[in-house]
Amino acid sequence: MIAAGGTQFEREYYESHYRDYARQNPPRKLKFYRRLAERAAGGKATPRVLDVGCAFGAFLSALDPKWLRFGVDVSQFATDRAALEVPGTTFARADFDTIPFPGTFDIITAFDVIEHVPSLESVAKSVRSRLSADGHLIFVVPVYDGVTGPIVHLLDKDETHLHKKSRDFWLAWAKENFQLLDWWGVYRYLVPGLGYVHLPTRAWRRFTPAVAVLARKRPE
């Protein structure tokens, strides 16, 4: 799920890095993401949610269709396909700085996206400006520290990963720009013959190759 500008994220990128997109987004993973979004929604019947770097719309397709769902991605290839696969959802080719939809959002999500974006300051500023007063940000990023760090470095063949940072870096970024509410570690890997392993954990969150973070906009 990508959101950093440039034609490098069109069909060739997806066929090279995400040719197993469906297998990499199994129901177990989407259910975890949905639970995070439902927690952020706080009981609102029809929250307004924006998925930045929506790719083919798998996450948005897992949400209650009564929710007001929007998705952006810098890839026209991705948003065209998402529009076909997720009816009732609004998609556009855009990034954090060029979101074309008016108004604010109760939830903004970015799954495996922020590490691709050159300016993290710009990401934070854009998200804050588009969140409602009590809005939430949910993001997932790979992390390159701890016991799994060397493995993540070895397996990471994506040259568009610009921020190969530690979990403490991302937690500090979240605290600096938002109210950090909670975070999880995530074990994940596409295992040949076994499918996609996706195991979120609090107990072992210091030893995982990725983290999921839930944060809220600070009161103004």
Image: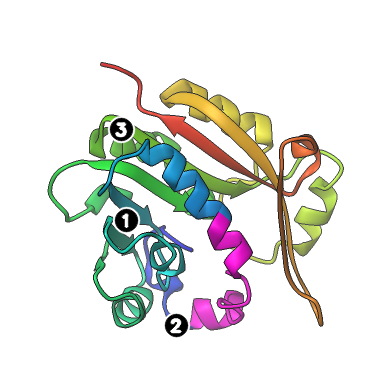
Residue 95 is labelled as 1
The residue stretch that appears in magenta = 12-31
Determine whether the residue tagged by mark 2 lies in a helix, strand or loop.
helix
Check disc 2: other Cα within 10 Å, few if <14, some if 14-19, many if 20+: some
Query: What amino acid type is highlighted by mark number 1?
Result: Asp
Q: CA distance from mark 1 to mark 2?
A: 17 Å
The foreground one among 64 and 58 is 64
Query: What amino acid type is highlighted by mark number 2?
Result: Arg
Quarter residue 158 falls in = bottom right
Please state the horizontal and vertical placement of residue 122, each as a whole percent of the image: 35, 38
- Kindly identify which residue carries mark 3: 128
- Kindly identify which residue carries mark 2: 11
Query: What amino acid type is highlighted by mark number 3?
Result: Arg
Instruction: Nearest to the eye among marks 3 and 2: give it.
Output: 3
Please state the horizontal and vertical placement of residue 31, each as a whole percent of the image: 55, 58
Residue 86 visible (yes or no)? yes
> Relative to 23, is 109 on the left or the right?
left
Residue 161 visible (yes or no)? no
Q: Are marks 3 and 2 in contact (CB under 8 Å)?
A: no
Please state the horizontal and vertical placement of residue 192, each as a whole percent of the image: 80, 79
The residue positioned 25% from the left and 43% from the top of the image is 105
The residue positioned 44% from the left and 64% from the top of the image is 62
Q: CA distance from mark 1 to mark 3?
A: 14 Å
Check disc 1: other Cα within 10 Å, few if <14, some if 14-19, many if 20+: many
Residue sitting at the far right? 147
